[in-house]
Amino acid sequence: MKDLQSSEQLEQALLQIGDEMYHDKHPFHLLMNSGDLTKAQLQAWALNRYYYQINIPIKDATMMSRLWDPEMRREWRHRILDHDGMGDDEGGIERWHRLTDDLGLDRAYVASTEGLLPATRFAVDAYTHYVRDRSILQAIASSLTELFSPGAISIRVPAMLRGYEYVTEKTLSYFEKRLSQAPHDADFALAYVKQHATTPAERELVCDALRYKCSILWAMLDALYLAYVEPGMIPPGAFDPADLPSARP
């Protein structure tokens, strides 16, 4: 904490955490970006990531229920609408369904979440509980992975278009939208924690919150790698490409 004497040092510490811990460096992601995943492995990734996507607005609604300031609630509300949609905007969850549709997964099966890896469910639920139970400062800080999302997306999208012939720009429309949404969210959260974390101890809590969120995302990919890459330990009841219960002909 001796190195967290100012908001500027806090920002640098957060950027270093992202550089070291963000999940774009995970072996599963590296395989995806290199075009080396099978279609079944991409299906497993999209299916499990769907649970994270549908819980983002739940997490943010939990956050809003804790905010007494109407201005803060107005700011946070748009995060829910970004995923649930409103009016002419179909929302991020629908765009994620487009991804799973194009990968050949049955929409009802995806929405049921029946094929999730247990670790996916545990990790995502833990994130929602973290936002519910920790301080407002920590809860907001946990969203700071959005600082690193645009950079990862800018690599992921062209890599997937090159690497997988069945993937199109329409398939990946979720990510295009996040290129404009994520920076807004990250800028607000970063400004908030820099203003409200006023002691070295509070700044360390902010850093711990970001480490925790990075670990959540990393753990989800650990589970995918173990189940669908090496050694191939698929838990009972989880999506099994050998059975293809969710694949459309």
Image (cartoon, helix red, strand yellow):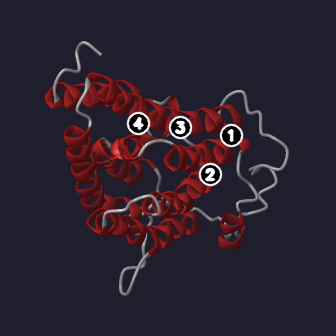
- What is the C-alpha distance between the residues marked 2 and 1? 10 Å
Label 1 or label 4, whichever comes before in sequence order: 4
239 or 241, nearer to the observer = 239
Q: Position of residue 177 (x, y in %)?
A: 32, 64
- Regarding mark 1 in the picture, which secondary structure is present there? helix
Label 1 or label 3, whichever comes before in sequence order: 1
- Regarding mark 4 in the picture, which secondary structure is present there? helix
Q: For mark 4, what is the residue?
A: 24
Q: Is residue 106 left or right of residue 148?
A: right
- What is the C-alpha distance between the residues marked 1 and 3? 10 Å
Label 2 or label 3, whichever comes before in sequence order: 2
Q: For mark 1, what is the residue?
A: 119
Residue type pointed to by label 2:
Asn
Residue type pointed to by label 4:
Asp
Camera-nearest label, 4 or 3: 3
Q: In the image, what residue occupies the spot 18% across and 24% down?
A: 9
- What is the C-alpha distance between the residues marked 2 and 3? 13 Å
Q: Is residue 35 above or below residue 248?
A: above
- Regarding mark 3 in the picture, which secondary structure is present there? helix
Q: Is residue 62 above or below residue 217?
A: below
Q: For mark 3, what is the residue?
A: 216
Label 4 or label 2, whichever comes before in sequence order: 4
Mark 2–mark 3 CB contact (< 8 Å): no
Residue type pointed to by label 3:
Ile
Q: Quadrant of residue 243?
A: bottom right
Q: Position of residue 61 (x, y in %)?
A: 48, 64
Q: Is residue 229 left or right of residue 168?
A: right
Label 2 or label 1, whichever comes before in sequence order: 2
Q: Position of residue 151 (x, y in %)?
A: 27, 43
